[in-house]
């Protein structure tokens, strides 16, 4: 049976704050701070436990080999010789943000009735531009069943593609045909627009989507300038519901009208700027939430960062919303502060795939017992603390490699080593 599976990126052992993402205000603010990889990874595991407790289906994606020696070789250097800047780019644990791993079009939307996945090229940021080969290797294993899945390589540069973080799907139900919304940015502002229109259009074509049920929508210039480097920082969709900030899109009314025309029953929950400013939205990440349908009663819950609860204006608005008659009925705060400090909330940490779990390689699926084992392994092997100066120490690279290998062995995925 088709259902939504959330694949969370396990936070890798080199998690650190190198300030690599221009336009990502949290990452810039925390550049140079000490990082706590073990705590970060355990926070991610606890978030997955919370989702399992809601009755949701959970999978994982794995950290990549760091430092990325193949990437440094292609640049004519290696970890020992690379300058500190390049080395930080080669060491990033950024694959944890699985929402940027790929764009996913579920089978009911595609012409050949297979679920299509296109790995994101992430070309805008150097530290993310070398993720795709490691991600593609995992996607080809996890979604190897050719009757159920089509896995595509990256859209070529220079067309920047950041994956599901700029893609939303609205549908009456997960297993019914839906409308797919591709959100792109236009350059010219103070920060880069990471998702290019050409890349979005290419992915829609590669996935063989019905043009009548495909929408290309522009991100608002103000949102990018305020720090919404991905659209999923200011909007999230689930089922027939779009939960969005008033200033997320360049032409919001046009988008809502298109949605309603193509999906009767579409419901827009718009948060006005007068109640929650863009700055509050980006500071609290209330939209970087997992908007999920609960199997128990079909109602919707918002799995959101505790930072949203810490902001009084935001929390007040949310409490008013769930007390009302709208589709979102429950707030589930989760603590992912280490990821948040690099600009990655609960929604950044997961890739949604609508599929029959029986068609997915079981090594990528988790239950509570497997999460316990992963948690114990993280306790044993992940570094407790990384200071910026530690990044050049070869012993840290060896520790990170050994930690990742222990995880691959635990999951029976050593072919990824
Ligand atoms: O690409 N942060 C990530 C955060 C990604 C969030 N994902 C979504 N919104 N879906 C980024 O900016 C910071 C790494 C550093 O600076 O060390 C970083 O890459």
Image: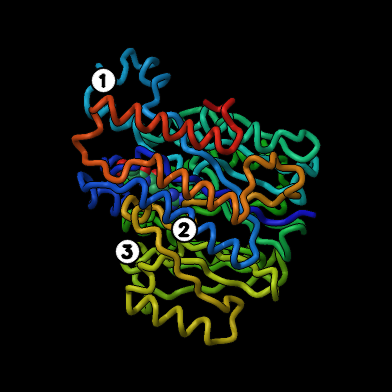
Could you say whether the residue bearing mark 3 is in a helix, strand or loop? helix
Disc 2/disc 1 C-alpha distance (Å): 33 Å
Residue 387, horizontal then vertical, whole percent? 21, 41
Total numbered badges shown on the rendered structure: 3
Q: Which residue is more in the foreground, 74 or 5? A: 5
Residue 82 is marked as 1
Residue 298, horizontal then vertical, whole percent? 69, 73
Residue at the spot 76% in from the left edge and 42% down from the top edge: 114
Q: Which residue is mark 2?
A: 346
Residue at the spot 49% in from the left edge and 56% down from the top edge: 347
Q: How is the image coloured?
A: rainbow
Q: Earlier in the sequence, mark 3 or mark 2?
A: 3
Residue 406 is marked as none
The local crowd at label 2, few if under 14, some if 14 to 19, many if 20 or more residues have their Cα within 10 Å, is many
The local crowd at label 1, few if under 14, some if 14 to 19, many if 20 or more residues have their Cα within 10 Å, is some
Residue at the spot 23% in from the left edge and 28% down from the top edge: 392
- Label 2 residue near ligand 1, CB within 8 Å: no
């Amino acid at each position: 049976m088709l259902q939504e599976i959330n694949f969370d990126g396990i936070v890798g052992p080199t998690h650190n704050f190198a300030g690599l993402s221009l336009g990502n205000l949290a990452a810039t603010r925390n550049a140079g701070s000490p990082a706590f990889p073990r705590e970060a990874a355990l926070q991610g595991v606890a978030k997955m436990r919370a989702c399992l407790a809601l009755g949701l289906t959970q999978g994982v994606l794995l950290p990549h080999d760091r430092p990325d020696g193949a990437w440094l070789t292609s640049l004519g250097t290696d970890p020992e010789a690379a300058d500190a800047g390049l080395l930080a780019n080669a060491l990033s644990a950024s694959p944890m943000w699985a929402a940027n791993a790929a764009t996913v079009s579920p089978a009911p939307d595609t012409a050949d009735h297979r679920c299509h996945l296109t790995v994101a090229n992430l070309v805008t940021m150097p530290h993310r531009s070398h993720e795709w080969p490691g991600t593609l290797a995992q996607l080809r294993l996890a979604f190897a069943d050719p009757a159920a899945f089509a896995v595509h390589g990256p859209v070529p540069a220079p067309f920047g593609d950041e994956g599901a973080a700029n893609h939303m799907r609205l549908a009456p139900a997960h297993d019914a045909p839906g409308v797919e919304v591709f959100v792109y940015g236009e350059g010219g502002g103070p920060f880069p627009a990471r998702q290019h229109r050409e890349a979005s259009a290419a992915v829609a074509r590669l996935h063989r989507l019905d043009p009548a049920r495909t929408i290309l929508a522009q991100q608002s210039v103000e949102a990018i300038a305020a720090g919404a480097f991905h659209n999923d920082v200011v909007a999230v969709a689930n089922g027939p519901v779009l939960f969005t900030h008033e200033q997320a899109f360049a032409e919001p009314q046009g988008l809502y009208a298109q949605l309603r025309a193509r999906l009767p029953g579409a419901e827009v929950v718009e948060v006005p700027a007068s109640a929650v400013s863009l700055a509050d939205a980006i500071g609290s990440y209330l939209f970087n939430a997992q908007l999920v349908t609960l199997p128990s009663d079909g109602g919707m819950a918002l799995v959101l960062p505790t930072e949203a609860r810490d902001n009084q204006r935001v929390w007040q608005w949310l409490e008013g919303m769930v007390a009302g008659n709208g589709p979102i009925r429950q707030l589930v705060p989760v603590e992912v502060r280490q990821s948040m400090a690099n600009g990655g909330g609960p929604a950044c940490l997961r890739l949604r795939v609508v599929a029959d779990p029986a068609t997915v390689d079981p090594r990528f699926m988790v239950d509570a017992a497997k999460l316990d084992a992963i948690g114990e392994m993280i306790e044993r092997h992940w570094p407790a603390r990384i200071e910026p100066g530690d990044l050049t120490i070869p012993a840290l690279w060896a520790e990170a490699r050994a930690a990742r290998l222990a995880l691959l062995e635990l999951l029976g995925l050593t072919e990824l080593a």
